[in-house]
Amino acid sequence: MMQGAASAWTTRDRASVLRARDRALFAHFLRRELTSRYLGSVTGLAWALLSPLALLGVYDFVFTNVFRATGFAGSSFLAFVAVALWPWIAAQEALMRGTLSLPGYAGMIRKVAFPHELVVLASVLATLALQFAGYVAVLVVLKLMGQPIHLSGFALAIPIWLIVALGISGIALALAAVQVFVRDVEHVLAPLLMILMYVTPILYPVSLVPESVRSIVAANPLGWVVERLRDALLDGRLALVWSDAIAVVTALLLFAAGHWVFRRLSPHFEDFV
Amino acid sequence: MTPDADVVARSKTIAPVRATTPPPESERPTTLMRLAHVGKDYAKIETRAGRMRLVFDLLRGRAAAHAYRALDDVSFTLERGESLGIIGENGAGKSTLLKIIAGVVKATRGDVDVRGRVGALLELGAGFHPEYSGLANIDLAAALLGLSQREIASKRDEIIAFADLGDHIRDPIKQYSSGMVVRLGFAVATALSPEILITDEVLAVGDESFQKRCVAWMERFLDGGGTLLLCSHSMYHIQKLCAHALWLKDGRVAQYGPAEDVTRAYLAYHEEKSATAKAGMPLAEAKASGAYAIEALDASADQVSQGDDVSLRGRAYSPDGRAPVVVVGIVRADGTPVFGIASDMDDVAVRRIGDHAFEFSITFPALPLAPGKYWLRAHAADPEGMRVFDHVERDLVVRGRTRELGVVHLAHRWHDGVDR
């Protein structure tokens, strides 16, 4: 574990063994995140699935029965929002949990040498994995209720979730690292995510946005996620488009940048966490 | 519990049960640890803005603008089978040094070379997660070492038995007392058969019986060729377990050598330090704070032979003009009090020589003290003899040649003795 230590054994052996250990450690963290956070308590699991469901119900009631909103290109508002809202909530929760994941491991960070990013990544992936399971369940139920959902769209939806996971992991790594030093990150993040949700066409179609600002709203990278999920799951269109490539590159860049920030800051966690 | 990758590597390729199979003699390096001019700076941050600045500095790859040196220019080597004690006051940099060796923090300066599987127990805990149960933390520790679930299963019972926590092993660690955490930590760190064991103040926390088991374990470990790095405030344990000692003072090596010498120098330093601390407040300060004080103290001699008379004469200050009680005593240089007497015990009043000044003198005839170094002390107390204020002391060396044991010569008589 001594990074600077010269050794009688080859560096290749050392690296491969460390990788094996890190994989085992990551699997351990992932299992822990899932069991202790969600599956450990009945309420934890229920809350993870019920809160997006409740939100979905409230939005459906408010928008279809109170505002009587229309213009969802033939599909019902419920299906329209369910497809996009759930991934948004998943990403938001993963980002929050990832950002705040390090202090829980403060004791370990102060006393044991290990790659700290495993904690953040495990936290993000555990959250997203669980939310994805909920997403699939809800869409299947909506389909059975007669909502116009194309389950074949998952062929595209799964890669989209993976791209989101990559990007969110990058952002979470950077924010988690900064959060160790500057505790305000979490207070800034919550309202910021709220604003982001409303400027992203989750609760409304881009077509309802006034012409003058439509290009700005459309440029939102989160808009890509929402649009492409609707293409796949509501319209059953699976063809790839150019913006998909841009999204992949953006997600890779976000991850690389987040990891770079994390690597720069993590040697100093021990003193501040 | 930081495994050195080398060793894990070797055992992965050669022996599946790495914990019990020692590598061939030829492969084992003899120098397990070499530190050269190691230093560590910590960022000094007071404000929120400072933390923000630090983040930007670190991102740009710069050192922190304000840093303090926790450790500077520390060098030593540790051979296989050797045992090194790290001693020093609180804040001297002991924990930082151990963290650098364990790989938890990176040294700012110097070279660190550690070989062999390291089991580390830093600052009373092996890096446990407070929310997890003891059992889950054993698994976590195993994962940190790169052990598979199957491999840890064989060690789990051993760890549980050594920690001896009963049913508490199923409770979250956060409910444990510090002694219980240390027991589990020690059990985990030792069960994985480290080549180098690093422990930081383990012995200070556990109860008597656990301490005994720890010391016994460490002795067995050393007998079996283990290498120990022990950080302790107990000079007894350092002397018992360590061949060498390193004394850290303000982040630097004050002394490094045989444990006997270093611990003796360290204790002497402390005695001196507490002596200067107790040397009494300056008279001006005493007068300002309304305390009784010894203004002057003279001994008839600073070197006497055993059986000589010794006299002390001094002047005491009284803030309110009432006659103070004077306490006179003799203390051996190792701090053992030999004798003390207060003027009011003997119904003696000190003689007034001014509004606030009093004089006293006392003689110890035919001083029976064993040869050695002593301090003659005088304390000023309030007239009620309740509150003792500062003291002033003078050195006294008693010369003599005797094979008698102890602190004083006691008058004695053998009965029915026959001349040899």
Image (tube, coloured by chain):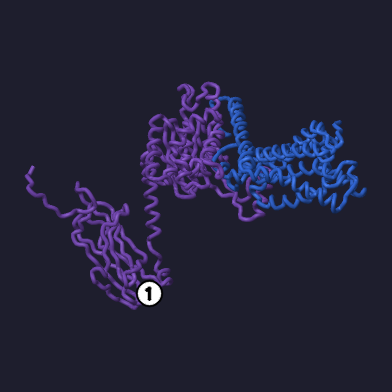
Chain colours: A blue, B purple
Could you tell whether A36 is left or right of B197 in the image? right
* Callout 1: SS: loop
Residue in the foreground of this view, choosing between A158 and A49: A49
Residue in the foreground of this view, choosing between B399 and B136: B136
> Residue under circle 1?
B319
Three-letter residue code for mark 1: Pro
Residue sticking out furthest to the front: A145
Could you tell whether B228 is left or right of A112 in the image? left
Q: Pick the quarter of the image with the N terminus of chain A.
A: top right
Please identify the quarter of the rendering in which residue A77 is found.
Answer: top right
Exactly how many numbered labels are in the figure?
1
Q: Is residue B306 above or below residue B15?
A: below
Q: Position of residue B352 (x, y in %)?
A: 29, 76
Whether residue A256 appears in this view of the structure is no
Please identify the quarter of the rendering in which residue B361 is found.
Answer: bottom left
Please identify the quarter of the rendering in which residue A94 is found.
Answer: top right
Q: Position of residue B213 (x, y in %)?
A: 39, 39
Disc 1 crowd, CA 10 A, few/some/many (<14, 14-19, 20+) = some
Q: Position of residue B311 (x, y in %)?
A: 24, 64
Whether residue A243 appears in this view of the structure is yes
Q: Position of residue A31 (x, y in %)?
A: 62, 36
Residue in the foreground of this view, choosing between A200 and A73: A73
| Subunit of label 1 | B
Could you tell whether B111 is left or right of A59 in the image? left
Q: Residue at x 78, y 46 (%)?
A: A56
Residue sticking out furthest to the bottom: B355
Q: Residue at x 40, y 69 (%)?
A: B286
Residue in the foreground of this view, choosing between B100 and A27: A27
Could you tell whether A191 is left or right of B328 in the image? right
